Amino acid sequence: MLDVLLIVAPIFMAIALGYGIATAGALPREAVHGLAVFVLSIAMPALIIKALGRNPAAEVVDLRYLAAYGGGSALVFGLGFGLSRFGLNRTWQASALACQVLGMSTSNSGFIGYPIAAVVIGRPAVIGLALCMLVENLLIIPAALAMAEAGTQAGAPVRTILKASVVRLIRSPIMLAILAGAILSALRVELPGPVAKTVDLFAGASAPVALVAIGASLVSLNVRALARMRFRSSSASCCSVRWRFSWPSGSSAPSIPP
């Protein structure tokens, strides 16, 4: 038990630090969003490029992990969608885009999962992070969008849905980092010294900044509302921010039903 506490203690201390700073008013809500954007668009991509680019392709691609995580995510998404659609009598579109359904099937890999895994298993954690991001961005989120469009009376053509998904992926810093890291790994190319050091600098900021951002975001949660919720998350606003941040600029993201 003591070993477990020693492993997770730094995680919760970093979260508590973020909560304390935000509670003291030194970190306003806009700044918390800025930290999240920094992690998703700069620090985490640098981390992924660093990890994938310095490992052989055979060690990066783990088909069993992809199958297990992808299959599990798809199964949970299906169960959540079924419960929302038939158990709660929500519309097809609302069920596909519900924060609860997406939250059940897409884990918080970057902000919680990776920092904990990095402490426990070390370097392999970032490879798992990249594979998780692949499943979420290539399978779960596109599937949710396609099902939501299919449930509308004026559903968009399949070509439009695929185009929107491709554009979102092309503009995603995480996906671009995975692609860059995979190319470096396959070609066994090393980054120039100054570039590699810059990547290392930002990569090291990923976990601590993510944990501080998580802690700071807890200040805005309504604990009483959370205690009274019935399959309706009071974190819908956080989900909406993440959803719209991942949507390609220049196009309107579909609204997330409550």
Image (cartoon, rainbow, N blue to C red):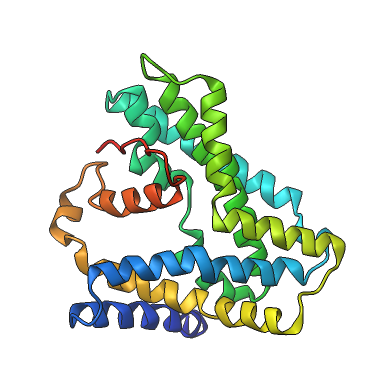
Q: Name the residue furthest right.
A: 187
- The residue furthest top is 153
Residue 175 falls left or right of residue 142: right
Q: Residue furthest left?
A: 224
> Does residue 113 show up?
no
In the rendered image, residue 215, in percent from the top left (x then y), is placed at 32, 73
The residue closer to the viewer here, 107 or 151, is: 151
Residue, x 45% and y 33% (percent of image)? 79
Q: Is residue 95 visible?
A: yes
Residue at the image point whose x is 41% and y is 74% from the top: 211
Which quadrant holds residue 20? bottom left
Residue 139 in the image, given as x and y percentages of width and height: 58, 39
Q: Is residue 46 above or below residue 90?
A: below
Image position of 201 with respect to 146: above or below:
below
Q: Is residue 177 above or below residue 15?
A: above
The residue sitting at 23% across, 77% down in the picture is 22
Image coords of residue 45 (percent x, y): 58, 65
Which image quarter holds the C terminus?
top left
Q: Is residue 33 left or right of residue 195?
A: left
The residue positioned 76% from the left and 79% from the top of the image is 192
Q: How many marks?
A: 0
Q: Nearer the viewer, residue 69 or 173?
A: 173
Q: Position of residue 222 (x, y in %)?
A: 16, 60
